[in-house]
Amino acid sequence: MNILEHIKQELPWLDANSTYDLTRGKPAPEQLDIVQNILAKIEQPFELDGIDLRNYGNPEGLPSARKLGATILDSKYDETHALDNSSLTLMHQIISCSFFLGFKNSKLSKKSKIICPVPGYDRHFKLLENFGIEMVTVPFQNDGPDLNAIEHLLKSEKDIHGIVCVPRHSNPTGHTYSDANVKALFKLAHPYKDNFSFFWDNAYACHDLYETIEQTPIDQIAKDHDMEHNYFQVGSTSKITLAGAGISFFSSSVSNLDTFIDFRNAITPGPNKMNQGLHMKYFEAIPLESQMEELKKVIKPKFELVDSCLKPLQEEGLCTYIKPTGGYFFSFNSAKNNADAIIQSCSKLGLKLLPVGACFPYQKDPDNTNIRLAPTFPDLTTLKRCISIFTNVTKYLN
């Protein structure tokens, strides 16, 4: 009996025409409905903070939106801008600005190399690859990127000009960087501060599901190490309000922000202030903390389900994973180095997963072990079927 016949016997509900998907970290319709139900009661403002939202201008964003960004990123108001949807777009623009204009302590080129903790965010890697930037990888230690590996790279490689990080509930591993780890990162980078960037994607800054360690704001750590011009922190409301219509935020030194606005003024005459104004009215209706609690009610049961299904596999020695304390993902590592076979078999049974190596630069997982699971989008019933397919395939192939 082949694997497909075996799994179909184990899961009699499997339908040849059914498809299941755990590829992307999308908010569930139930999450978006929470937002829609509140938005339906809010009237679109056309003026806020004494500013006509209908017009051009205010390239740094509305003052009230900047305050929201400073709250989410734990940054200073005058070092935070509120811009358009998607922090990934912001990251692209920041990289572009570093290439073409250069920041005070950041000037990227085709010779530049960026340190990438792995497994990591696939879109970060594709972005850097598109710019022709060489990516060099380091593994994780318990509380953040492997410091010994980073030290070795900095001493042995030329033209290392930065590191890209998701410092809280890291995508996909769930790591939350300790203060000790971040301070050590800055200490290691300090000798190279004339051209070194911390690309700090704080996408899950307030997405805690369980108790998670507190973190000192990156601007404070940067200033303590005389590197206030070396960090570029981004975040957004994409997974807080509407994924396709959120606000993004950028925090850095005032000098860097001024350079960035000069660069961005050639792209757009200003951010979408109508959307920013609507968001401000939204968070008047429901405070940020209350919004996150409502979202947690939808997401946390899904994380509990996935954990309850993966835990027996780990106890049997079939895999390793760390239960994340928040964010949007689980990072699964096969004990048999057969991630490709698991992904292919799941695909034949209707379950879509990211391709093998997706969470590594150039799509190359050297150990063929890692699979990212994104459990937020399906409803609980569908998610249970997804994980049943996945765990049964894993058991069969091990």
Image: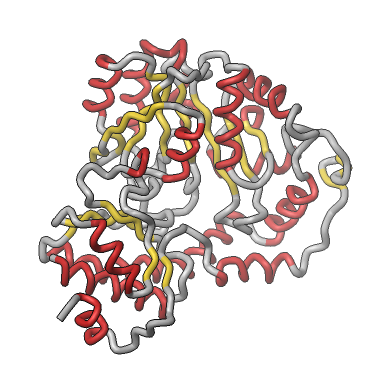
Q: The N terminus lies in which quarter of the figure?
A: bottom left
Regarding residue 324, the answer to whether it shows in the image is no
Of 12 and 280, the residue lying toward us = 12
Q: Position of residue 279 (x, y in %)?
A: 71, 53
- Work out which residue is located at the far left of the displayed protein and give it: 316
Regarding residue 29, the answer to whether it shows in the image is yes
- Please give left or right for residue 291 compared with residue 387 in the image: right
Residue drawn at 49 percent across, 50 percent down: 206
Residue drawn at 37 percent across, 70 percent down: 351
75 lies above or below 254: below
Q: Position of residue 263 (x, y in %)?
A: 69, 24
301 lies above or below 86: below
Q: Position of residue 166 (x, y in %)?
A: 42, 40
Q: Position of residue 371 (x, y in %)?
A: 30, 55
The coloring applied to the image is secondary structure
The quadrant in which residue 360 appears is top left
Of 361 and 221, the residue lying toward us = 361
- Work out which residue is located at the far front of the displayed protein and give it: 2
229 lies above or below 37: above
- Please give left or right for residue 40 compared with residue 228 in the image: right
Of 93 and 291, the residue lying toward us = 93
- Work out which residue is located at the far bottom of the displayed protein and give it: 12
The quadrant in which residue 44 appears is bottom right
Residue drawn at 40 percent across, 61 percent down: 374
- Please give left or right for residue 102 compared with residue 384 in the image: right
